[in-house]
Image: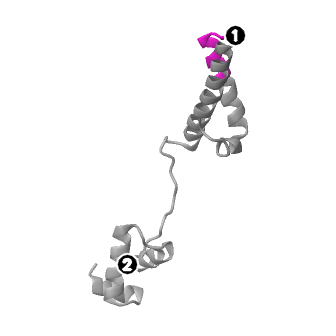
Amino acid sequence: MSMAHMAARMGISQPAVSQMERREAEGAITLNLLSQAADALDCDVVYALVPRAGSLTEAMETRARHLAGGTVGRVSHTMRLEDQAISERARREQVDDLVRELMDNPRTLWTRDVA
């Protein structure tokens, strides 16, 4: 679609369309303006956040596993220093148990710092 046609459909000037295109290229366009452009093109704007891990559940489990690994690792280190080391299998089981606890209360996943 030409800039002139787009401007006419949006009810704005050609320089305003040019500025809109520039803002869009810079990642600085507002959702309101993008919605107006979509209307002019007989389209809808779809705004979504998509987890990089593939699904929200996978993202949550990755975060829980990271938190649990850090927590259990610190405790295991202290126990080793006190000559009370646990086996690698027991450490993995503790991590798995803590992951399940964290997944049962997912709000804690985002309020805790990652070690």
Closest to the observer: 63 or 78? 78
Q: In this view, does 100 lie to the left or right of 7?
A: right
Name of the residue lying farthest toward the front: 81
Q: Please, is residue 59 above or below residue 91 in the view?
A: below
Q: Which amino acid does label 2 sit on?
A: Met
> Where residue 72 sits: x, y (%)?
65, 24
Give me the residue at 41% from left, 77% from top. Answer: 37
Closest to the observer: 5 or 67? 67
Which image quarter is the C terminus in?
Answer: top right
Which dot marks residue 13? none
Q: Is residue 72 left or right of residue 52?
A: right
The magenta span reads: 84-95
Closest to the observer: 12 or 109? 109
Which dot marks residue 20? 2
> Where residue 6 sits: x, y (%)?
34, 83
| Most frequent secondary structure within the magenta stretch | helix
The answer to whether residue 94 is magenta is yes
Disc 1 target residue: 84
Give me the residue at 47% from left, 75% from top. Answer: 35
Q: Please, is residue 74 above or below residue 56 in the view?
A: above
Q: Is residue 12 left or right of residue 92?
A: left
Helix, strand or loop under label 2: helix
Q: Please, is residue 8 above or below residue 22 in the view?
A: below
Q: Please, is residue 24 above or below residue 16 in the view?
A: above
Q: On the image, which quarter does residue 109 sit in?
A: top right
Q: Which amino acid does label 1 sit on?
A: Gln
> Where residue 98 sits: x, y (%)?
69, 28
Q: How far apart are marks 2 and 1 (CA)?
A: 64 Å
